[in-house]
Image: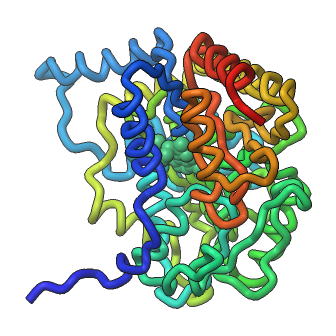
Amino acid sequence: MATSNQSYKNLSGSYLFPEIARRTKAFAASHPKAKIMRLGIGNTTEPLPPSIVKGLSSGVKKLSNIKTYSGYGDEQGNTELRRRIAEVKYKKAAEKIEADEVFVSDGAKSDTANIQELFSQDSIIAIQDPAYPVYVDTNVMAGRTGKAKENGQYEGIVYMPCTEQNNFFPELPHKKVDIIYLCSPNNPTGAVATKEQLKRFVGYALENEAIIIFDSAYERFIADKKLPHSIYEISGAKKCAIEINSFSKEAGFTGVRLGWTVVPKTLVTEDGASLNAMWNRRQTTRFNGASNISQEGGLAALSAKGLKETQKVIDLYMNNAKVIRKGLESIGIKCYGGVNAPYIWIKCPKGMKSWDFFNKLLEECHVACTPGSGFGPSGESFVRLSAFGHPKDIREAVESIKKNLKI
Ligand code: PGU
């Protein structure tokens, strides 16, 4: 008789974003006249710029011709794309990133979910709280935790609170941990780690033979020139960090699907295993490579023209972020983030709980947000607004909040 993976029973609820979609849909069904403005999930809305469309089209065209047709490619990704990622994205790395340390994928979500497989079952995981829920949920599914406790924390995970008091960047773990998830620019708080802050974590990881899993999916949204875009800007990080990134937000590939993970060859676990060799083994066994069409699009996105064009779209989203912050602050709402990240982290007025404020925004203003508590217990009494949207819709949402929110 087949029995199920018992660890799934430890999950305390459904995945956050479908749950928001479900509640928003239910509200829409019972209020058919309401125009709902969706600032919940971070989903891109602007069309792909011309050079990327050209790249994708050339990928399709190649498939139509007997001379250029290709089927399965290398599981690790197109060699030229791996080279270009290493070159363009890691220019400022303290130690050079090589093309064969870059593994192309269908997006950062699957990589952030799959990477935990490389580590032993008894590894102790430390996670920023709040955090992108995939980090916690996949470790729960893998059986590295117990059930959720009353305070919302899963047994066995080391939570690193990110609060107003520490400017949303955590202290070092209070006990010895093996795997540390860091995300900067941060989803959901919009905070960006400084070099000094990253140095402290790299120092800790080297000293404790821990591995950092660094999610930099929003690095292109950093405007402040002093802030690091990659953990590899920190000397020593190639000995202790994996970095995961994506074309989703920076190039509008949320539906196209393309991302990558850097696993340095110098990365060795306490028991002497090469994580680069293990990830290579894992990917070649479980993954048949990203779409060859998407990869042509990725190459175009990293061309000089592509980078210029995507910057314009990023600027548009970041202008949305400014509009959201300014609008909400004008009615006395405390906002964080939204300066070097496309998310605005909002303190619920009068200490309201996240889901209560979610309902209030939906009912009074017809705006959907993401409840902060969905990202972890320290996100309680916050909500996240996403700056991904058409500027007109964002302005409309902000006006509706200013006009209709009763606080
Ligand atoms: N990493 C972070 C930190 C993210 O916020 C997201 C998407 C991803 C990875 C996924 O990137 P892909 O390359 O597109 O796979 N976060 C969005 C979407 C929600 C989700 O379930 O992925 C968000 O609204 O937080």
Residue found at x 62% / y 36% = 361
Q: Quadrant of the N terminus?
A: bottom left
- Corner quadrant of residue 341: top right
Relative vertical location of residue 136 with respect to residue 406 in this rendering, above or below = below
x and y percent of residue 279 in the render?
43, 66
Q: Quadrant of the C terminus?
A: top right
x and y percent of residue 342 in the render?
68, 34
- Corner quadrant of residue 85: top right
Relative vertical location of residue 326 with respect to residue 270 in this rendering, above or below = above
Foreground residue among 94 and 42: 42
Q: How many marks?
A: 0
The answer to whether 304 appears left or right of 37 in the picture is right
Foreground residue among 45 and 199: 45
x and y percent of residue 316 in the render?
66, 16
Residue found at x 58% / y 82% = 149
The answer to whether 250 appears left or right of 240 in the picture is left
Residue found at x 68% / y 79% = 158
